Amino acid sequence: MARHIEDEVKYYYDSHPTEEDLMGETAFHANLVHYLMEVLRWLVQAQVCAVYENLNMYQTRDIYEYPVAPDIAVIKGVAYEEFTRSWRVGKSGPAPQVVFEIASEETWKKDLTQKPEKYARMGVQEYFAYDPHEVPLSTSKNRRLFGWQLNQQTMTMQAMTPASNGALWSPSLDSWLVPDGTMLRLYDRAGQLRLTHAEAEARRSLAMAEKLRSLGVDPDQLI
């Protein structure tokens, strides 16, 4: 217990804003992050897995270390804790298997040029950057989705090659990531859309209502 207490660190940027904190975010940025959080949490709901939004991540005991805070981080093998304020790789748990960054005009260049190396050093397995702007920020053939996978031998990020529709396969999520304008969708191997909890429940209710009608029962009369 004493060793655990000695190893605790109160990081400066857990109580002071970073540059990114002061930027704010657009409505479509927030909407996409919220949607992906709901999809991912439902996707991993049967697993021991934590999905966090904008969680400060550190690698050292330096209280002034500048954190990396991905828009979304998927960390397998650990349970989600509501009051987690920050994450120290190697102490709090492993590095995220998957991280997402959603583009803003202020961060997009860093997302594409600096973040892959930072996440490689952290040990992140897959990194995806998505541009939901109506007119894509990237000049690379209006491409919206970019992805990298960690090379375990060199500990560097290798760029993924997209499919003809711009989609990328995520082994960690067992899903296709498919650009859809201002949204980013996830599909399984069979081409079925990954749903949020609410969408899955609505689909179940609809299927049950259709089944009842096929049996001659009006589901509206059962309420």
Image: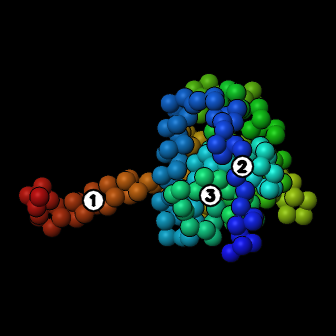
Q: Which residue is mark 1?
A: 205
**Other-residue count near label 3 (Cα within 10 Å), few / some / many at <14 / 14–19 / ≥20:** many
User: Label 3, label 2: how many angstroms apart (C-alpha)?
Assistant: 22 Å
Q: CA distance from mark 2 to mark 1?
A: 47 Å
* Whether residue 44 is situated above or below residue 16 in the rendered picture: below
Quarter of the picture containing the N terminus is bottom right
Label 3, on which residue?
A: 74
Q: In front: mark 3 or mark 2?
A: 2
Q: Which kind of residue does numbered mark 2 sit on?
A: Tyr
Q: Is residue 77 above or below residue 197?
A: below
Q: Residue at x 63, y 49 (%)?
A: 55
**Marks 3 and 2, the one that precedes in the sequence:** 2
Which quarter of the rendering shows the C terminus?
bottom left
Q: Secondary structure at mark 2?
A: loop
Of the image marks 1 and 3, the number of the one nearer the N terminus: 3
The residues tagged by marks 1 and 3 sit, at their Cα atoms, a distance apart of: 29 Å
